[in-house]
Amino acid sequence: MPKASSGDGSAEIGAVILTPELIGKSHNEIIEYIDHNVVLGKGDSLDLKAIDEACLTQLLQYNSETHLLQLSDDEIKASYYKRDELYTPENYSSLNLKDAYVDNAKRLVSIPNVLSQQEFAIVEELFIAIEDSKKLTNRSDAYKAVKSSIQKASSSIDNLKLDYSVHQGYVSRLTIAVAANSLEYWYQYHQNTQNPPSLPIWVGMDAMGALVGAGVSIGNDWIDGHPINWGHAGMGALGGAIGGSVPSTRWFKAVFV
């Protein structure tokens, strides 16, 4: 079982400390790496199996070059979260983030130290705000609105004074960290594009992917009666966030380039 780190709410697999901040930072770096190394063509943007295989291959290659995660290939493969139909590009514009959040997060509230009722409400409010921001047609306005919502959620979680030594706040903080990093990445990614896709959709799906990826790992441990492997939960969050991004990247290239 992974050891708790020294009070910062992180979790370990091997030598790596998977803080929420590292998960958010790694998400952006790996997506950029994948975007530059996966050759994409029109017509294959909806091939989910190919997306996952290419993504995992590039994640392993990136880690072998940078040692950012300090994980073995087997550890990454074991923890990498494969996406389901929630993440198909055609669903991006129609998915209601609040409904998807409630559906995926409600089961985590009953597990000790995973997601308190207060955290649940704070993160739900964040996804509602991101959902509402989809209506904004000016991308600068959308950026400011989402950024403000993320900052508010982060401050609200900090004000709860959670006990990070037992991983309280880990899931909520990693979801917020991915949202914050994703916002900056996609804002820059689409900066010089005419009629760019909706910024809040991309941010919302990345954050949702992180939540779902961590939640699947935690939920499986809990159902099986095993101690929660927080390191695998962190890697699941990273894999889920990447899974949320890669179709966006492929779809963007297939449709807008």
Image (cartoon, rainbow, N blue to C red):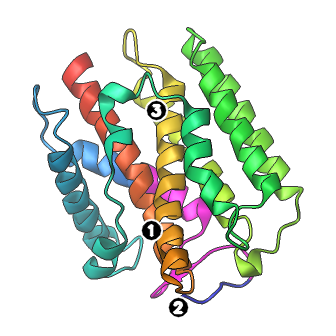
Which mark sits nearer the N-terminus, 2 or 1?
2
Pick the front one: 110 or 190: 110
Task: Where is residue 147? Give x, y as percent.
Answer: 68, 33
The reply to whether residue 33 is visible in this rendering is yes
The reply to whether callout 2 and callout 3 are in contact (CB within 8 Å) is no
Q: Which mark is residue 64?
A: none
**Which amino acid type is shown beneath numbered disc 3?**
Trp
Determine whether 133 is above or below 157 in the image. above
Crowd around label 1: few <14 · some 14–19 · many ≥20 (10 Å): many
Residue at 81% over, 74% down: 163
Determine whether 60 is above or below 37 in the image. below
According to the image, label 3 marks what residue? 202
Left or right of 135, for residue 121: right
Residue at 19% over, 24% down: 254
Q: Which mark is residue 1?
A: 2
Q: Does 187 lie within the magenta span?
A: no
Pick the front one: 94 or 222: 222
Q: Does 13 lie within the magenta span?
A: yes
Crowd around label 2: few <14 · some 14–19 · many ≥20 (10 Å): few
